[in-house]
Image (cartoon, rainbow, N blue to C red):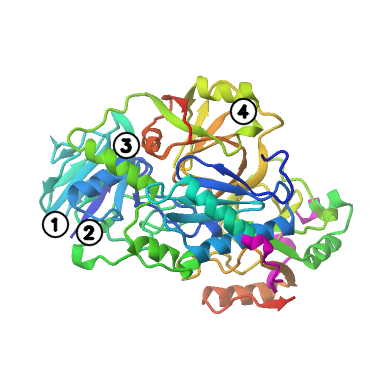
């Protein structure tokens, strides 16, 4: 049950006749999220008959299946077995940290002043704290390539705008409550915009349309306006992919 | 070998069975809203299940053919005509070069499908031709059809198996799924229905009843709240679209609000918003959502929801595993 989830237990609930959800916890934590992706990769490797797609999220994994080829009970048994095995896998994974260039110039940051005022900090202090954070990608959703990031400095958390903007430009970097993120596509949205990245988070006609993976980390690297446009030009020619470093 | 769009209708898009394998990256499935009508049209032409069709909404389009073709119309009754003369639905109709096929307002149902022998020739994006307007992919340039658009038909010899790129296909899963000829649950259950209905089209009407299984988050609602959901009549609201059917009726009581830690959604998930009203998530749904899901509509009953119009009513009947 979602409310009183027994610690360490795996709870499986049906979602109609074509899916089940595996609930691995009821909080947002790296440990639970690691278990979600361990199970996700275990199922991808296992490729059970009838599996159609997987949707990993903060603390659960949605398993979509074809009821003509498998059953709820069959899939449930397999998931419980794999969850047991993948929980014992304590192999430490290397951390992949993507360096995402971000321009905090006022041109791209219409809400930076309001975030600073709310936080009781200067604009420089807000962008400094934002670019010092190491953010974990817990999941993708909402739009293709939209990452749900954990790790925002609580000092610069800020409520969403009272009324959402009709159009937020592609690449906008914002703060919404205790989260920060990047808009991969122009979209309506209520987050406060404090910068922009020239990197395209979602390129639908590329073989790998989204380069980020859940479980990866992001760091925002401050750039000036000139560098922003230099990188944007390279991006439009398809010549730019952000750097990633791997650490233990 | 193709057709020209003279009038696009209210919202006409190219759709197929949907884009699976990329939801982990936030890419929605999309695909036909009424899988039963969609699969019936392909089946009646001897097409592949994956061939793309035009899905029309409430008001159909007008199309001129530049070559002879076999076509099938299924789904909502939009009083189709060929050169002004009424033509049947749910059976193959031959058209000649220069013929014009026109559809009007839906007199029964909401969504109609136009299939041509061979399917429409638009590029595969992540293994599917389905249009997602929000993600700017699929169909014609990721948008709804416009007057003046030209659509080519594929012939059997030009057909290629869908390419399997990307995260899920990297692992070989989607390829294995496709080459084994397996079908998604939706398709399989809808195929049987389509075969039974191929002789005479269904009547949709304006009051619907669909089966739904409690969960996955029915524990976030009081017993009274769940009883309300399974005993009340809900009315479809304006603002419903391919992402979700917005309903209004008796307020559903939750234990302590309906916000959850975001998790995955399926076609047919019934979210309850903070105002206590249901939204049934449909083909263009986001891959994940942050509202508790009180129940999930059974796949065989999803085509009924796809044919609802604003003002129509629906009742949810409790189903068990």
Disc 4 secondary structure class: loop
Percent coordinates x, y for residue B38 in the rendering: 30, 45
Q: Earlier in the sequence, mark 2 or mark 4?
A: 2
The chain identifier of the residue carrying mark 2 reads B
Counting from the top left corner in percent of width and height, residue B138 is at 40, 58
Left or right, A41 with respect to B142, comes to right
Q: Quadrant of the C terminus of chain A?
A: bottom right
> How many residues crowd around disc 3 within 10 Å: few (fewer than 14), some, or many (20 or more)?
many
Kindly state the secondary structure of the residue where label 1 is placed. Answer: loop
Residue picked out by circle 3: B59
Q: Pick whichever, B145 or B73, lies toward us.
A: B73
Residue span colored magenta: A85-114
The lab-note entry on whether marks 4 and 1 share a chain reads yes
Is the C-beta separation of discs 1 and 2 under 8 Å? yes
In-front residue for pair A29/B272 = A29
> Residue B58 colored magenta?
no
Q: Earlier in the sequence, mark 4 or mark 1?
A: 1
State the SS at label 3.
loop
Separation of disc 1 and disc 3 at Cα? 25 Å
The Cα atoms of the two marked residues, 1 and 2, are separated by 10 Å
Q: CA distance from mark 2 to mark 3?
A: 23 Å
Camera sees residue B97: yes
The residue that mark 4 highlights is: B276
Question: Are the two marked residues, 1 and 3, in contact with CB atoms closer than 8 angstroms?
Answer: no
> In the figure, residue B83 lies in which quadrant?
top left
Circles 2 and 3: CB atoms closer than 8 Å: no
The residue to which callout 1 is attached is B67
Mark number, residue B153: 2
Label 4 – label 3 distance at C-alpha: 32 Å
């Amino acid at each position: 049950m979602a409310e009183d989830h027994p610690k360490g237990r795996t709870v499986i609930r049906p979602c109609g006749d074509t899916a089940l959800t595996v609930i691995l916890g009821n909080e947002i934590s790296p440990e639970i999220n690691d278990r979600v992706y361990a199970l996700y990769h275990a199922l991808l490797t296992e490729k059970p008959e009838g599996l159609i797609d997987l949707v990993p999220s903060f603390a659960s994994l949605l398993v979509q299946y074809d009821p003509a080829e498998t059953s709820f009970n069959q899939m449930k048994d397999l998931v419980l077995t794999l969850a047991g095995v993948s929980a014992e896998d304590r192999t430490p994974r290397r951390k992949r940290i993507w360096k995402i260039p971000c321009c905090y110039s006022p041109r791209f940051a219409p809400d930076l002043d309001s975030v600073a005022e709310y936080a009781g900090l200067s604009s420089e202090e807000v962008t400094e704290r934002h670019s010092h954070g190491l953010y974990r990608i817990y999941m993708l959703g909402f739009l293709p390539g939209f990452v749900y990031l954990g790790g925002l400095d609580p000092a610069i958390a800020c409520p969403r705008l009272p009324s959402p903007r009709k159009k937020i430009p592609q690449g906008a970097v914002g703060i919404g409550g205790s989260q920060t993120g990047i808009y991969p596509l122009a979209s309506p949205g209520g987050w406060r915009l404090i910068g922009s990245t020239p990197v395209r988070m979602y390129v639908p006609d590329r073989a790998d349309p989204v380069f980020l993976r859940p479980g990866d980390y992001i760091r925002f690297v401050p750039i000036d306006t000139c560098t922003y446009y230099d990188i944007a030009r390279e991006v439009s020619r398809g010549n730019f992919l952000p750097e990633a470093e791997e650490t233990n | 070998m193709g057709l020209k769009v003279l009038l696009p209708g209210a919202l006409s898009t190219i759709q197929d069975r949907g884009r699976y394998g990329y939801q982990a990256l936030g890419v929605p499935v999309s695909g036909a809203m009424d899988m039963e009508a969609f699969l019936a049209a392909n089946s009646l032409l001897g097409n592949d299940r994956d061939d793309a069709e035009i899905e029309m909404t409430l008001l159909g389009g007008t199309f001129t053919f530049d070559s002879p073709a076999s076509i099938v119309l299924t789904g909502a009754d939009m009083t189709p005509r060929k050169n002004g003369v009424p033509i049947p639905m749910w059976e193959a109709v031959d058209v000649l070069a220069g013929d014009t096929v026109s559809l009007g307002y839906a007199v029964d149902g909401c969504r109609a499908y136009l299939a041509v022998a061979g399917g429409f020739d638009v590029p595969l994006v992540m293994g599917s031709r389905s249009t997602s307007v929000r993600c700017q992919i699929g169909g014609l340039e990721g948008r709804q059809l416009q007057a003046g658009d030209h659509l080519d038909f594929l012939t059997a010899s030009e057909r290629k198996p869908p390419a399997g790129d990307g995260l899920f296909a990297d692992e070989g899963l989607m390829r294995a799924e496709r080459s084994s000829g397996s079908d998604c649950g939706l398709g399989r259950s809808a195929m049987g229905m389509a075969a039974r209905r191929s002789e005479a089209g269904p009547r949709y009407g304006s009051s619907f009843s669909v089966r739904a299984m409690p969960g996955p988050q029915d524990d976030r609602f009081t017993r009274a709240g769940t009883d309300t959901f399974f005993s009340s009549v809900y009315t479809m609201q304006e603002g419903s679209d391919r992402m979700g059917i917005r309903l209004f009726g008796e307020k559903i009581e939750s234990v302590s609000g309906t916000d959850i830690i975001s998790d995955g959604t399926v076609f047919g998930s019934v979210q309850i918003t903070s105002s206590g009203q249901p939204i049934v998530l449909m083909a263009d749904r986001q891959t994940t959502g942050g509202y508790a899901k009180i129940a999930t509509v059974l796949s065989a009953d999803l085509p009924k929801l796809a044919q609802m119009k604003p003002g129509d009513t629906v009742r949810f009947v409790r189903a068990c595993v």
